[in-house]
Amino acid sequence: MEDERNGGLFETEVGGKWRRAYRVFATTVLVSIIWIWVYRATQAPAGYRRWVWIGMFAAELWLGLYWLLTQSVRWNPTYRRTFKQRLSQRYENELPAVDIFVCTADAVIEPPMMVISTVLSVMAYDYPPEKLAVYLSDDGGSELTFYALTQAAVFSKHWLPYCRNYKVEPTSPASYFKSASHPSDSTHRQDFTVVQRLFEEMKNRIENVTKNGRVPEELRLEHQGFAEWDSFTSSRDHEAIVQILLDHNQDTEGHSLPKLVYMAREKRPDHFHNFKAGAMNALIRVSSVISNAPIILNVDCDMYSNSRDTVRDALCFFMDEEKGHEIAFVQYPQCFDNLTKNDVYSGCLRIIREVDFHGFDGLGGPLYVGTGCFHRREILLGKSFGDGSRIDWKMENNHKETTENLIEKSKDLACCTYEIDTEWGNEIGLKYGCPVEDVITGLSIHCRGWKSVFYNPKREAFLGVAATTVDQILVQHKRWSEGDLLILLSKYSPAWYGIGRADPGLLMGYMIYCLWSPSSLPTLYYTIVPSLCLVNGVSLFPLVSSVWFIPFAYIIVSITTFDYLEFLGSGGTTRGWWNDRRIWLYKRTSSYLFALLDTILGSDLSFVISSKVTDNDLRERYEKEMMEFGGSSPLSTMVVTVSMVNLVCFLGFVMKLVSMDTETLKAYYETMAVHIMLCVVFVVLNVPLYLALFVRTDKGKVPSSVTVKSVSFSLFICTLFYFM
Ligand SMILES: O=c1ccn([C@@H]2O[C@H](COP(=O)(O)OP(=O)(O)O[C@H]3O[C@H](CO)[C@@H](O)[C@H](O)[C@H]3O)[C@@H](O)[C@H]2O)c(=O)[nH]1
Ligand SMILES: [Mn+2]
């Protein structure tokens, strides 16, 4: 039994049952890594092989040190549990207000119907609605999205009571009606039918309008807010729009509804808008005059709420009497509702969620990763940890003004000149200048002395849309790895700025992500050079019979086994692990490499928004777990080229094999075992890609332009190396 009167609002468990055993294992791996370094340092051959050898040494040095960094998050895994009973017993009447920000930016790849389902889902939390305010920031400035939101405002009057009465989960109507079966209880069934009909009608209206691409005149008359679009030129050139759609109006049962606000900040072609960070900062300001809640939750427009308890869970951390005052933000994991069983694109981020972030939590707290994160408003505004860090939960909003005044004021706060000559984007609010505004902002908060908490409840708190093509996943990871590398080079670098300001273990953890992109080089070297050497018989590894072989064999076997077990232990499947390894390779040799090049060349900051729509044709293949290679970006060309180099080397090796007698074969194996293994593994890993290159005929196959380029590149590389 929970003792409700005593004890904290949350509990922390450090360790996990395997921690001791893991530490012993990690030590053996470290010994082997050093052993390999010694081998490289002392056994270098002469001649041109020396250079190839030095390359191997450099790669192994890097990968070994990188492995050391990854130990930080495996050292002290930490798990949290909350006591919502206690929260409500002690504080039910003093619960703080919460502002919820939903961000959208493009009505085409983020369909309005999806956006409002997310909005409705977060309106329906099990939380006093008069304390909730939901803001939709629309960087697309789309009247289609606005129209959808007006419809959602009306529908919420039915949806929220329904969710409350039947404790519905998930509270996203789109997701609920997709999977819910007709309830057996008869009143519930009646209500279900009514609400479902209202939902379908709304959906039809919205989808019709979206399909036509404009809101018809007669519908525009339904809401005076459409007048804002009269002066509208384009999504990149328009005035600030702020509309309060619900001001704690009543639902059909007379209960209050949350506030609901639409905001499209001003956009002008000659003002850089700083992507999501800019939107968040405008939201922070606009909400400060409208509701000014001390707690802020932010979600991306696809990340609907899947659990009614999330707000209360988060508050258990912030309001804990003993530790609450040190916690700046509570991050929930990013989970997805469109994953297939074996997760072909490894979109689930399984190890990040089940291993890395629990590790971070033991070191001072997880990174801020954008969506699914609760913040304390004053800390986002730049407050440092110190004496005054006990929070004033009643932080009243003293703007008792008319709605017109409020809206005028808000528009000023959302105009693009507002931030000129201010500290916004620098000392105040989310940081600018980095494609991962979230991570850099979280880091600066950690460096100001705050902690954060990772809460990973059994029932996922938020569910979003994961990538469904190779190109999408590569582009997303390019943005992430480029952003993380920029953090390393930024003012807030964990490699220098952070030292002395944050826990060294935590900084090591940050470094894992910051070094994603440079890690592409050693990985690329390892994926192609040993395979190339296989053909001309140049050995870069010790003889199978020598003692030097031991650390290589040990590392290969033990790390692979460990990786596999860790993946299964985190809830993955065997094929899921294999898919994860493939995507790992693709990200490392392509996304991360291009991120590195872009950073070195200093390309302009960009933010390619992830598409959240799939057409039926694609969805069918996705559900069959066929990889989608349809793109022709340099990113996928790179992936195909690397896989082709391995295939060509493998074929060259097979041809060589055929002409060998048993004696030569034995000697060859003795010297080339590791090369053979690496090449074979890469080839087997790439089988789905080869099928997409040479066998498949559907739209997901590799486009012929990419095939031509990649095949020629790879033949060129192999020939060049062969004659070297
Ligand atoms: O100019 C922009 C661009 C994007 N967004 C919104 O930002 C969110 C994230 O964009 P998405 O394309 O879905 O990127 P992801 O890679 O899936 O997002 C992760 O990574 C981003 C940083 O790269 C963070 O901003 C996100 O919160 C985090 O979920 C979406 O809601 C967008 O609508 C804006 O509001 N304005
Ligand atoms: Mn996203």
Image (cartoon, rainbow, N blue to C red):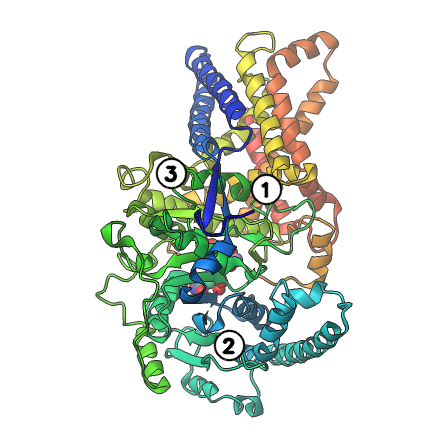
Residue for badge 1: 583
Measure the alpha-carbon separation of dots 2 and 1.
Answer: 44 Å
Asked if the residues shown at circle 2 and circle 3 are in contact, with their CB atoms under 8 angstroms apart, the answer is: no
Measure the alpha-carbon separation of dots 2 and 3.
Answer: 41 Å
Q: Residues within 10 Å of mark 1 (few under 14, many from 20)?
A: many
Q: Is residue 109 above or below residue 49?
A: below
Tell how many labels: 3
354 left or right of 504 in image: right
581 left or right of 377 in image: right
Q: Residues within 10 Å of mark 3 (few under 14, many from 20)?
A: many
Q: Nearer the viewer, residue 22 or 388?
A: 388
Residue for badge 2: 257
x, y (%) of residue 477? 50, 48
**The disc labelled 1 sits on which kind of residue?**
Ile
Q: Residue at x 41, y 44 (%)?
A: 365
Q: Residue at x 28, y 48 (%)?
A: 448
Measure the alpha-carbon separation of dots 3 and 1.
Answer: 26 Å
Is the C-beta of the residue carrying label 1 under 8 Å from the nearest atom of ligand 1?
no
Residue for badge 3: 506
487 left or right of 638 in image: left
Q: Is residue 34 above or below residue 460?
A: above
**Mark positioned earlier in the residue sequence (2 or 3):** 2
x, y (%) of residue 340? 68, 50
**Mark positioned earlier in the residue sequence (2 or 1):** 2
Instruction: Name the element at disc 2.
Output: loop
Asked if the residues shown at circle 3 and circle 1 are in contact, with their CB atoms under 8 angstroms apart, the answer is: no
